Image: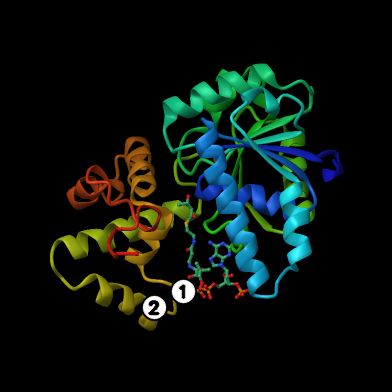
Amino acid sequence: MSNSTIAQVGVIGGGQMGSGIAEVCARAGLEVVVVEVDATAAESAEGRVRSSLERAASRGKISAGEVTEILARVAFTSDFDALADRDLVVEAASEDEQIKLELFRRVGALLKKDDAVLASNTSSIPIVKLGAVSGRAEKVMGVHFFNPAPVMQLVELIPSLTTAPETLDRMRGFVGEALGKEPIEATDRAGFVVNSLLVPYLLSAIRMYEAGYASAADIDKGMVLGCGHPMGPLALADLIGLDTIRAIGVSMYEEFKEPLYSPPPLLDRMVDAGLLGKKAGHGFYAY
Ligand code: 3HC
């Protein structure tokens, strides 16, 4: 099925991922509404999209006029009902199963178009459960972006046992043609492809640091200079957000009972202390 049927996109949550997804969609010419919990959060989401676009303009990737045009395509609101007329809603709320279930219940009942797709940017929460509570399981699937969304080319597509093949086809077209990103497909198992490999690696680096093997800077330098990674695991953990990594690790551990997925005590303590990484100004590094 053609992706041209998706013109109006809703994004639930305007944090790092939600604002990045909204920016990607608006830059692709789509009309976007970002729904946040309150007016202050909606304003912060707008600030994130604006500063990312201004950064792109300062690097000559887009013009100042394009910044204005792209921003004009995105509305930021705390009015959940603004999602009702969307062709596609991408949920990018916190990685918390109860929050996501409640959102899928609400938005599933709200969508007016029969063929509207309801996607989650979750990394690890079962898509099948989100589909079940939405009342429209055949139109629900995982569409998982990577941070920073405007830069990373990959999007994972995750149909569940109850997703209709047409929904997957539609999202394949949307991601590949409308957004110009590269889709890969994965089964509805916590972690999908990328986090199943990445999260144990990040948690191992945190364990290594916790055990005093090496400094944070040297662990990171090891992987950047020794393996050619764009950033080391502790800097990447700070970029993703330590609360997010912890939540993904917990979901993956619950699913597979694999000790490598279990968050180490230092990660728990850092999250409890509010040392959440770059977004909080402090994690393994100070920002
Ligand atoms: N928003 C928009 N653009 C950004 C950006 C952001 N937050 N951060 C960087 N960019 C752009 C820059 O504008 C620049 O563009 P240009 O080269 O075309 O001018 C380009 O990205 C490179 O940026 P910088 O020169 O400032 O910095 P680096 O070269 O160090 O690159 C990086 C930064 C792109 C973040 C790079 O270090 C990288 O790729 N890191 C790995 C990121 C990664 O692994 N992400 C996946 C995380 S896992 C995930 O998200 C899944 C989840 O479920 C946990």
Neighbours of disc 1 within 10 Å: few (<14), some (14-19), many (20+): few
Q: Is residue 242 left or right of residue 142?
A: left
* Amino acid type of the residue that numbered disc 2 sits on in the rendered structure: Val
Which image quarter is the C terminus in? bottom left
- Residue at the left extreme? 212
Whole-percent x, y for residue 145 in the image: 58, 51
State the SS at label 1: loop
Residue at 37% from the left image edge and 38% from the top image edge: 251
Which image quarter is the N terminus in? top right
> Are discs 2 and 1 less than 8 Å apart at CB?
yes
Q: CA distance from mark 2 to mark 1?
A: 6 Å
**Pointer 1 residue Cβ closer than 8 Å to ligand 1:** yes
Q: Which residue is mark 2?
A: 224
Q: Which residue is mark 1?
A: 230
* Amino acid type of the residue that numbered disc 1 sits on in the rendered structure: Pro
State the SS at label 2: helix
- Residue at the bottom extreme? 225
Q: Which quadrant holds residue 258?
A: top left
